[in-house]
Image (cartoon, rainbow, N blue to C red):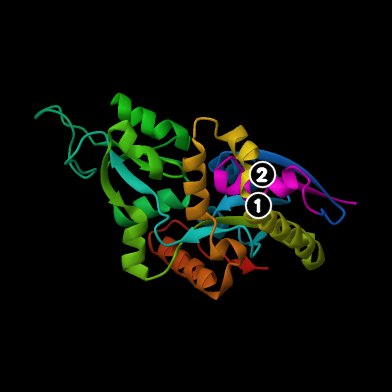
């Protein structure tokens, strides 16, 4: 039996796609999956530290990890209309403007969901030098804006569906800016596998993930308890809005359009100095 240390995020699109593995609803093909669930930036950090054989990661992190990991062609989150939102605590404000009274102005406090997230990359691409950036867990961003302890936040995941309920203001859809600039789907994150695993083991793992995704798509209601276990505050309606947005044709198969989008992301990250010099091209299994 092959043992695979697997890391996935707690987001509904991942728990939906991996429900078949987590609950052993599919043939695991002789693989013993040891699964951990974390926030995506924690997964990014753990991958940089050498943990996990296979794990979900931000594509921004994946570009920096290309010497050791490649992208599995199933399980990705990318598309049109899926990008992070730049939200404000108050309407009609901009992160490039000074905050506070005259004579006591300061840089705006801008919260991002992790240094290696694609969301942070997009903010730095489209708002260079604006505000004082701080990295926090994604789930802390909207509460901080609502409480007035931060001025702006780059919100991901369910924040796309619930920000209005928190009385926040939309400054910009960063994904829409990406689409205008590149005419490509936005690559948010994907499943990475260690190159040292070899093609045969990666193919087996890919097939199991593909089966798990197919199971979820065919048995949507069966996935609800698994999704709710890690997103207890969300209604079934919001859970499936999340799934229907982030689980799409590129989740089933990254394809040529997805690979082309990753190349564009790599070029943009290099342009603003957010990729190590001489970073190798990302392998697509």
> For the image shown, how many numbered marks are present on the structure?
2
Q: Is residue 214 visible from the viewing direction of this image? A: yes
Q: Nearer the viewer, residue 238 or 166?
A: 238
Q: Nearer the viewer, mark 2 or mark 1?
A: 2
Q: Is residue 261 magenta?
A: no
Q: Nearer the viewer, residue 125 or 166?
A: 166
For this orientation, the residue located farthest to the bottom is 256
Q: Quadrant of the C terminus?
A: bottom right
Residue 222 numbered tag: 2
Q: Is residue 147 above or below residue 234?
A: above
For this orientation, the residue located farthest to the right is 1
Residue drawn 50% across the image and 53% down it = 244
Q: Is residue 165 above or below residue 219?
A: above
Q: Secondary structure at mark 1?
A: helix
**Residue 86: % across, % down:** 32, 46
Q: Secondary structure at mark 2?
A: helix
Tag 2 near tag 1, CB within 8 Å: yes
Residue at numbered disc 1: 216
Spatial CA span between label 2 and label 1? 8 Å
**Residue 247: % across, % down:** 54, 56
Tell me which segment is drawn in magenta.
1-26
Instruction: Specify the quadrant of the image occupied by residue 213.
Output: bottom right
Residue drawn 77% across the image and 67% down it = 199
Residue drawn 62% across the image and 49% down it = 220
Q: Is residue 52 visible from the viewing direction of this image? A: no
Rate crowding at label 1 as few (under 14), some (14 to 19) or many (20 or more) other CA atoms within 10 Å: many
**Residue 197: % across, % down:** 78, 59
């Amino acid at each position: 039996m092959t043992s695979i240390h697997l890391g996935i995020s707690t987001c509904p699109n991942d728990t939906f796609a991996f429900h078949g593995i987590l609950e052993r609803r599919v043939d695991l093909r002789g693989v013993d999956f040891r699964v951990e669930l974390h926030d995506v930036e924690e997964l990014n950090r753990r991958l940089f530290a050498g943990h996990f054989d296979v794990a979900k990661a931000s594509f921004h992190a994946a570009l920096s990890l290309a010497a050791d990991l490649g992208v599995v062609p199933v399980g990705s989150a990318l598309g049109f209309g899926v990008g992070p939102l730049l939200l404000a605590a108050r309407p009609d404000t901009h992160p490039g403007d000074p905050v506070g009274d005259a004579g006591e102005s300061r840089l705006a406090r801008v919260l991002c969901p992790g240094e290696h997230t694609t969301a942070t990359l997009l903010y730095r691409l489209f708002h260079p030098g604006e505000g004082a950036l701080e990295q926090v867990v994604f789930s802390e961003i909207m509460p901080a804006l609502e409480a007035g302890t931060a001025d702006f936040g780059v919100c991901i995941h369910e924040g796309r569906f619930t920000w209005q309920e928190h009385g926040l203001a939309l400054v910009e859809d960063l994904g829409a800016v990406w689409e205008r600039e590149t005419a490509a789907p936005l690559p948010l994150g994907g499943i990475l596998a260690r190159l040292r695993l070899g093609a045969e083991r990666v193919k087996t793992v890919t097939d199991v993930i593909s089966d798990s995704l197919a199971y979820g798509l065919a048995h949507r209601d069966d996935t609800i308890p698994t999704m709710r276990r890690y997103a207890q505050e969300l209604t079934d309606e919001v859970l499936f809005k999340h799934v229907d947005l982030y689980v799409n044709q590129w989740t089933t198969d990254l394809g040529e359009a997805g690979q082309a989008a990753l190349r564009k992301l790599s070029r943009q990250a290099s342009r603003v100095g957010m990729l190590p010099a001489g970073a190798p091209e990302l392998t697509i299994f």
